[in-house]
Amino acid sequence: MSTATRLRLFQAFGVELEYMIVDASTLDVLPIADELLRDGAGSTDYVDEVEADDVCWSNELVAHVVELKTATPASALQPLADQFTAHVARINQLLAPRGARLMPSGMHPWMDPERETKLWAHDYNEVYEAFDRIFGCKGHGWSNLQSAHLNLPFGDDEEFGRLHAAIRLILPILPALAAASPIVEGAATGLLDTRLDVYRTNCGRIESISGLVVPEAVFSAAEYERQIFARIYADIAPHDAAGTLQHEWLNARGAIARFERNAIEIRVLDTQECPAADLAVIGLATAALRALVDETSASYNAQQKWSAERLSTILHRVIREGERAVIDDPEYLGLFGIQQATLTAGELWQRIYQANEPRLELSAQSRSALDVILNRGPLARRVLHSLGADRGTAAPESQRLDRDAIRAVYSRLCDCLNAGNVFV
């Protein structure tokens, strides 16, 4: 792409949403993504993508997950919730004769990865087989996690640096909006965002691939190549003689630079109960990023000074406690124009919302979803509350839960996804 035709900051958006395919009655995972995509394409052969107007459907690492993504960069966020919801309904119609449906949220609440994992077996499977050989993909951090990705473009190296600086600063608090994975293997884990917790350790054999999830403080393509890509490729090389995995997408930080398409992809968002809620989170996050890039309350120079270690301390707290996590770093709060010593992550997002409400580019449905998130907590909090497992103002704790009760709640989540409704 020539410099003249490159998209500039916030000129377009790429959104990806991942969903589980489950048995419509039991809600157990069903590894039939290949059959779904073949049906959607109207083909006799297996395909890895269905080009369906404004939204594409594609496969992922495991055969019980399907990804929906904008076919081309979207010029506005407002229409996307309706577009994704229409495709969810279409997919559910195709799945119904197979006794299946889509399930949202960040993780399946009782999947057994050791027993139920089935990798995608068709085109591109050599990549998945390489991941499985090196890391072993029969684990929650590989086969049981669904996320929403936001891709934001940059036009040149200066724009990359400013966007990367801003993204690094909001990554630690995004789970306060998006946490949707509190239950794994039939138990409340004691974490609101279990998906992020297992995600940050799934490449533990080669730690440089995920780093600290919050990316290093690098603000140019050359720096990124030298400090991140070069290290990742050197560390994977002894395990990947054929070079199958030595590409930009091997980087598994919470935000990854995609220089091949001049974008940064944010990957720390759990999938919500319906696209309107995903777009609510994405819309508020985008407004916060615009304010940082515009240096509304902190200079670009000040934004560059934050280490990944310092930011990851906040992230770990928010992974555990969500919107109730206490942020007691006044310098961090000052980046958002707040002159207080402490705030909860939820209170911080309330302030960010109030300061940036005119910047929000959301449909009425997504605005309603955002109101629920800001006032009743992220989806993980609402799920725990529905199961009687929310301990009020205290931190979450691990506890076994009744399977039938979990199934009833997650059946409601499936209904919310199909109808495009918020879970309350």
Image (tube, rainbow, N blue to C red):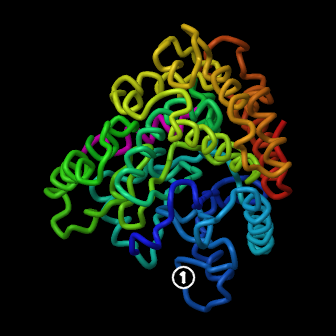
Give percent across and percent down for residue 95: 74, 70
**Looking at the rendering, which quadrant does residue 355 occupy?**
top right
Which residue sits at x=52%, y=19%? 334
Find residue 399 and report its horizontal and vertical position in percent. 63, 22
For image coordinates 76% across by 49% down, the residue present is 362
* Boundaries of the magenta span: 193-206
Q: Quick one: 382 or 279, which is closer to the camera?
A: 279
Residue in the foreground of this view, choosing between 40 and 215:
215
For image coordinates 57% across by 12% down, the residue present is 339
Disc 1 marks a residue whose amino acid type is Val
Whether residue 116 appears in this view of the structure is no
For residue 176, which quarter of the picture? top right
Q: Choose between 31 and 341: the one closer to the eye.
A: 341
Prevailing SS of the magenta stretch:
helix
Q: Identify the element where label 1 is drawn.
A: loop
How far across and down, in percent of the image, does residue 394 sit? 65, 11
Kindly tell me whether residue 59 is visible in this rendering: yes
Q: Is residue 166 above or below residue 245?
A: above
| Residue that label 1 marks | 47
In the rendered image, residue 418 lying in the magenta stretch gets the answer no
335 lies above or below 117: above
Question: Is 163 situated left or right of 259 in this image?
Answer: right
Q: Is residue 203 rendered magenta in the image?
A: yes
Vertical arrangement, residue 125 with respect to residue 25, above or below: below
Name the side, left or right, on which 306 lies relative to 382. Answer: left
Q: Quadrant of residue 248?
A: bottom left
Q: Position of residue 197 (x, y in %)?
A: 47, 34
